[in-house]
């Protein structure tokens, strides 16, 4: 039996039972043979079960029902080796954060992001820092290119907070960048754009500029 067979049978069982929620515990109870195979053969960069690889192969509707159980209290820690394991495994695809040539590049970029997201959700603050750095570059490009995100221009700290929020809340396998984009689009609708003015702007009848109306108070202690 191989992974393709496991996924085929798992999708068949899910279609038959139609559970409202799906988790690793559900698979143990309803398809133990699949769980044994996954536990033995499907591992991520740090040795844990790569459930993202499994859920990405499920039918789309079942992906949305996937539940990841997390500890209520996550203790922050720093582990540079974990981050390096992810980056080194995908080093040939790191260029996708600068330019993506095709759908395969988009898929590879999301795999890297999701691997770092899972480390961050475990509490690795270095993984979060790496993600914020990578994603800030992408979001800045979105803000310059896409009308619906232009309101975020000038709100650097708020953008970083949204990125961190998406890292914490990302749940099932799908496009993490798509999730981040939609979050910024929807939450940015009520933002007032930052207005930038220059002292050289022409005002009133065009005879004067803004600098003509600047009042400089004389220091009472000056000689």
Image (spheres, helix red, strand yellow):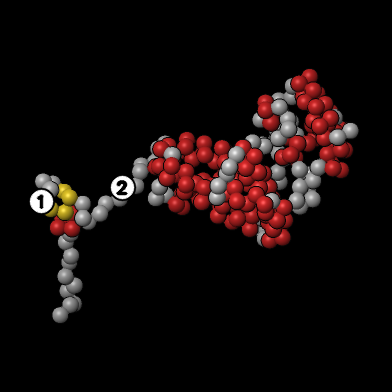
- Quarter of the image where the C terminus is located: bottom left
Identify the disc placed on residue 207. Answer: 1
The tally of labels here is 2
Q: Residue at x 10, y 51 (%)?
A: 207
Q: Which residue is at the front of the view, 223 or 115?
A: 115
Q: Is residue 12 left or right of residue 156?
A: right
Residue 41 visible? The answer is: yes
10 Å crowding of disc 2: few (<14), some (14-19), many (20+): few
Residue 102 is marked as none
Q: Quick one: label 1 or label 2, which is nearer the N terminus? A: 2
Q: For the point 67% across and 26% down, which residue is it? A: 61
Q: Residue 4 in the image: x percent, y percent?
A: 81, 32
Q: Which sits in the foreground, 218 or 42?
A: 42
Residue 116 in picture, x, y percent from top left: 66, 50
Q: Residue at x 16, y 48 (%)?
A: 203
Element on which disc 2 rests:
loop
Residue placed furthest toward the top: 16
For the point 51% across and 51% down, the residue is 137
Q: Which residue is mark 2?
A: 195
Callout in the foreground (1, 2): 1
Q: Quadrant of the N terminus?
A: top right
Res. 164 visible in picture = no
Q: Is residue 195 left or right of residue 179?
A: left
Q: Secondary structure at mark 1?
A: loop
Q: CA distance from mark 1 to mark 2?
A: 23 Å
Residue 19's image quarter?
A: top right
């Amino acid at each position: 039996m191989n992974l393709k067979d496991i996924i085929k049978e798992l999708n068949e069982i899910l279609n038959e039972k139609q559970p409202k929620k799906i988790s690793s515990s559900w698979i143990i109870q309803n398809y133990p043979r699949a769980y044994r195979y996954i536990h033995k053969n499907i591992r991520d960069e740090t040795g844990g079960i790569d459930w993202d690889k499994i859920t990405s192969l499920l039918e789309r509707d079942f992906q949305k029902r996937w539940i990841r159980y997390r500890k209520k209290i996550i203790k922050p820690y720093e582990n540079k080796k974990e981050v390096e394991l992810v980056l080194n495994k995908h080093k040939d695809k790191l260029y996708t954060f600068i330019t993506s040539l095709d759908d395969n590049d988009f898929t590879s970029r999301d795999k890297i992001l999701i691997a770092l997201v899972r480390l961050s959700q475990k509490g690795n603050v270095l993984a979060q820092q790496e993600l914020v750095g990578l994603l800030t570059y992408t979001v800045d490009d979105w803000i310059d290119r896409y009308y619906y995100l232009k309101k975020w221009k000038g709100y650097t700290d708020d953008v970083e907070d949204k990125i961190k929020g998406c890292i914490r809340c990302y749940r099932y396998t799908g496009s993490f960048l798509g999730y981040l984009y939609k979050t910024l689009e929807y939450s940015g609708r009520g933002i007032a754009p930052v207005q930038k003015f220059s002292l050289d702007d022409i005002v009133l009848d065009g005879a004067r500029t803004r600098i003509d109306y600047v009042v400089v108070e004389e220091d009472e202690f000056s000689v």
